Amino acid sequence: MAINQELLDILACPQCKGEIHLNDAEDGLICEACRLVYEIRDDIPIMLIEEAKPLNP
């Protein structure tokens, strides 16, 4: 089951409050401004700054 588009529309980066988008593999949400990836586990986005991973260049 994929992330619901309505949920994606209301989610924002918890660090900068900017826009996020689904990555190509659909297993994470990317904030381009902060260069962070928020993992999606069991169809639940983990929107914790301390658990975010740096976006690869």
Image (cartoon, rainbow, N blue to C red):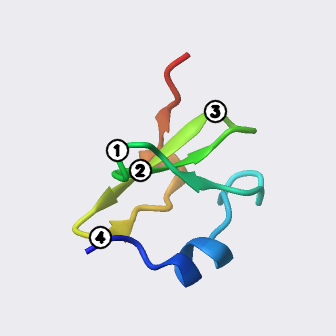
The image position of residue 20, as x and y in percent, is: 64, 55
Residue lying at the far top of the rendered structure: 57
Across and down, in percent, residue 17 comes to 76, 60
Tag 4: amino acid: Asp
State which tag comes first along the sequence, 4 or 3. Answer: 3
The amino acid on which the numbered mark 1 sits, given as a three-letter code, is Ala
Cα distance in 3D space between marks 4 and 2: 10 Å
Residue that carries the numbered disc 1 in the rendered image: 25
Task: Give, as a three-letter code, the residue at label 3.
Answer: Arg
Place of residue 43 in the rendered image (x, y in percent of width and height, measured from the top left): 29, 70
As helix, strand or loop, the secondary structure at mark 3 comes to: loop
- Residue annotated with mark 4: 43
Would you call the spot at circle 3 few (<14 residues within 10 Å), some (14-19), or many (20 or more)? few
> Foreground mark, 1 or 2?
1
Residue 9 is tagged as none
Residues at badges 3 and 1 in contact (C-beta under 8 Å)? no
Instruction: Name the N-terminal-most of marks 4 and 2.
Output: 2
Q: Quadrant of residue 24?
A: top left
Q: CA gap, disc 4 to disc 3?
A: 22 Å
Q: Which type of secondary structure does the marked residue at label 1 adopt?
A: loop
Residue 31 left/right relative to 53: right
Q: Residue furthest bottom?
A: 6
Q: Residues within 10 Å of mark 2 (few under 14, many from 20)?
A: many
Question: Which numbered dot is residue 28?
Answer: 2
Q: Nearer the viewer, mark 4 or mark 1?
A: 1
Label pair 1/2, CB-CB below 8 angstroms? yes
Lower sequence index among marks 4 and 1? 1
Query: How far is disc 2 from disc 3 in space, using C-alphas?
Result: 12 Å
Distance (Cα) linking label 3 and label 1? 17 Å
Q: Quadrant of the N terminus?
A: bottom left
The residue labelled by disc 3 is 35
Tag 4–tag 3 contact (CB < 8 Å): no
